[in-house]
Amino acid sequence: MSKEHKEPKSTPSPVIADGRTLGVIGAGVMGQTLIKGLLASGLIERERIWAGDKNAATCETARKALEVSVQVDFHARVPTADLILICVKPADAAAALASLKSGGLRPDTLLISILAGASTERLESLLGADNPVVRAMPNTPAIVGEGMTVICRGTRATADHLARARHIFEAVGKCLPVDEVHFNAVTALSGSGPAYQYLIMEALADAGVRVGLPRHLALTLVSQTALGAARMVQATGRHPAALRDDVTTPAGCTIGGLLMLEDGRIRSVLARAVEEAARIAANLGPPAAKPPEPPAPHRAGH
Ligand SMILES: NC(=O)c1ccc[n+]([C@@H]2O[C@H](COP(=O)([O-])OP(=O)(O)OC[C@H]3O[C@@H](n4cnc5c(N)ncnc54)[C@H](OP(=O)(O)O)[C@@H]3O)[C@@H](O)[C@H]2O)c1
């Protein structure tokens, strides 16, 4: 990436910086990524963010990395939050939401969940309170201000709540509202997407080494080429196939390389990868509540 992060904004945002407080539940990879990205964007002051995590070691690491309050015992802070980002694994959603409720969650606090596979309907039912809920699917390049996030709103969230969530994610990249029906596909394409791109870049860098380049040079060439190609698609609005044609001289080396990629069925391999990730995303949600135990059979006394 050519820039570490966006420059802090000169004028404070009306959305968070007007004295609102943001709580983040789960200070693992994504919790830390979003906090770092938001701090770098200048959208929120450090003093207005707190985080909670049930893992004491993670709290310690996150506190050092972020220089914000990160506590195992975060419950007393819950009523101070105007917005809460929920960044735990889907399986931990029920416990995290229960801890918010028992911590004295205010009814006007906006909850933004980034959990893969957890529908707004499921989140609302697990919460069992009338708070507005927005569902988001971000990705890790948010840490350098180049994230891609989609959002949708639950039944109790208004257009204003959605706009607030959008403002947060736009501070760390692009953000689009989409219909919730697309969330598993989005999770597979842009949520998991950075991992595919890293694998492709790693493979191309290895290819560079194979044809004689020093590894660090190969990786620089590959990452800058990926960035440049992405910028070309966005800046020109042209179809990638048309941009590819521009690079493909008759009888040249590029068409030779492209045909080898087609022989390796690169299109169907990528499509199958995304299809498989979407299938898994569809089954990732918080586990269903266990049905109540049937009453123990009556045993006659001896
Ligand atoms: N990683 C990605 O690229 C990505 C992208 C988009 C969305 N997501 C979503 O982001 C969520 C978090 O993923 P992640 O990779 O950041 O996971 P992670 O690194 O495991 O972080 C989750 C953290 O939450 C803690 N936690 C669990 N239950 C808790 C509770 N009840 N209260 C407070 N803290 C609790 C965990 O502690 P323990 O370790 O002790 O369990 C862990 O430190 C997932 O739902 C995932 O679907 C991830």
Image: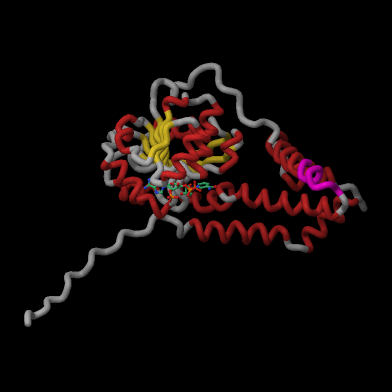
Side of 110 where 128 appears, left or right? left
Side of 225 where 51 appears, left or right? left
Residue 227 seen: yes
Residue 159 seen: no
Q: At 58% from the left edge and 59% from the top edge, which residue is drawn?
A: 275
Q: At 39% from the left edge and 55% from the top edge, which residue is drawn?
A: 286
In the rendered image, residue 66, in percent from the top left (x then y), is placed at 50, 33
In the rendered image, residue 300, in percent from the top left (x then y), is placed at 8, 80
User: Of 76 and 278, which appears nearest the observer?
Assistant: 76
Q: At 49% from the left edge and 38% from the top edge, which residue is drawn?
A: 62
* Quadrant of the drawing holding the N terminus: top right
Side of 112 where 262 appears, left or right? right
Side of 237 where 96 appears, left or right? left
Snapshot quadrant of residue 174: top right
Region in magenta = 213-220
Disc count in the image?
Answer: 0
* Quadrant of the drawing holding the C terminus: bottom left
Q: At 54% from the left edge and 33% from the top edge, which residue is drawn?
A: 37
Q: Main secondary structure of the magenta part?
A: helix
